[in-house]
Amino acid sequence: MAQTHFTFPLRGTWYAGNGPTFYTAHRWALPEEFGFDLIQLGTNSSSHRGDGTGFSDYYAYGQPVLAAASGHVKVVVDNIAENPEVLQRPGESKEAYGQRLQQMQAEHLEKGTAAGNYVLIEHGEDVYSLYAHLRPASITVKAGDLVTAGQVIGSLGSSGNSTEPHLHFQVCDRPDPLFCAGIPVNFEDIVLPYADGPRPLQSGDIVQSPSSKSAHGVPNHNY
């Protein structure tokens, strides 16, 4: 478990999709085995309004992303365009969509753009937090900057190897999103309203950060 004190990198109420439990894809990839994919849900437990064919349809899109702990910005990438082709098309079968995704994912891996636009923050020796798939031109920090916990560092997007707008957050031991080993993290400021007791965040959890409002001052969506 990381010794750094981490707070949740988003405000409001979120759903933890892929995470550190054994049945998710994250747990079987060394860099992200303790990382999270975080999305927002609206009415009918959907992550988007309408048919979800545009990034702006998604509740999570454009939400502020916060530094989870104080540290120095080690790496910033902010030149990766978002591709709306990553979104599932209305009426498209899961099989056809999966084939398209595999091709796009392979291209990102070949080009080294899987994390999309991202910020990597150093929190001490061999502890780095990653905030991936950020919205283009939204990053507000640069390499070398000192940031404080809770500081806005960018906006949530869907760049890189992303199937819909979400934040990929992980902590690992090297300053590289793909060539590092993941480190377990326990957020100090969260509430798990449907958990049977206090415990670390896991895949499938609804998670609430301290504020009952989003960083924009707008009430959260109903779940």
Image: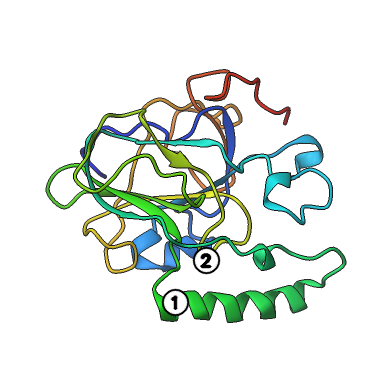
Residue type, numbered disc 1: Leu
Percent x, y of residue 201 = 46, 39
Percent x, y of residue 188 = 36, 28
Identify which residue, 33 or 217, lies in the foreground: 217
Residue type, numbered disc 2: Asn
Provide the secondary structure element on which disc 2 rests: loop
Provide the secondary structure element on which disc 1 rests: helix
What colouring does the structure picture have?
rainbow
Percent x, y of residue 87 = 70, 62
Q: Is residue 57 above or below residue 115?
A: above
Which residue carries the number 1 mark?
A: 109
Which residue carries the number 2 mark?
A: 161
Distance between mark 2 and mark 1 Cα atoms: 8 Å
Percent x, y of residue 124 = 14, 43
Q: Is residue 15 above or below residue 177?
A: above
CB atoms of marks 2 and 1 within 8 Å: yes
